[in-house]
Amino acid sequence: EYRGERFLMGQHGANLRLRSDWSYIWKVPRCLAKPGQPAVVVTRRDRATASRCSTANGFVYVDARPLDSEVSNPLRFVNGAKPGADAAQTGAGANVEVFFADDRVFYYNVKPVKSGDELFVDYGSGFWRVPGSGSSGGDDSANAVVGDWSDFLN
């Protein structure tokens, strides 16, 4: 599980947290299961469920930045797999995938991973967009990245 502090838009400090911690935050569609029913699981391919849940219940944000210990939150240190030429050149395409359940974020392997291998997840093309450009760019510094995982939710 990708651990972090959960918050909703409208809570005190939410906008500041989004601006300062964005590269550590997952925007999770809220799929609230009825009492006694199993959790609703949303994968990247299940855009209809993500849309239905977020339309009905909004989003919860999971901010991992405050949990900066490899022991308390090892998945905070999974890196983004940059799509396109970079991943093809380095062979560092995504080897884990994400799914959401009960306002929580989980990763699972999609390729074999050996002990000591670095883990990469595809955050979506929106994560790599340079602010104001409307397109993906090569600069992934903290000031240049706009992460919205838009291709996951749209």
Image (spheres, rainbow, N blue to C red):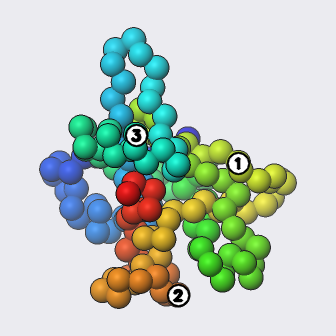
Is the residue under label 1 in contact with that under label 3 (CB below 8 Å)?
no
Lateral position of residue 58 relative to residue 110, left or right: left
Residue picked out by circle 2:
138
Q: Residue furthest front?
A: 48
| Along the line of sight, the residue nearer the viewer: 44 or 109 | 44
Mark 3 falls on what kind of element? helix
Which is more toward the observer, 60 or 58?
58
Which residue corresponds to the image point at 62% horizontal and 78% vertical from the top-left? 84
Nearer mark to the viewer, of 2 and 3: 3
Whether residue 105 is visible to the viewer of this picture, yes or no, is no
Distance in Å between CA atoms under marks 3 and 1:
22 Å
Q: Amino acid at mark 3?
A: Thr
Report the residue marked by disc 1. Answer: 109
Gap between marks 1 and 2 measured at Cα: 26 Å
Q: If you read the primary sequence from the N terminus, does the residue marked by circle 3 or circle 1 appear first?
A: 3
Circle 2 residues within 10 Å: few <14, some 14–19, many ≥20:
few
Q: Which mark is residue 49?
A: 3
Percent coordinates x, y for residue 83 in the rendering = 60, 74
Q: On the rendered structure, is 60 left or right of 44?
A: left
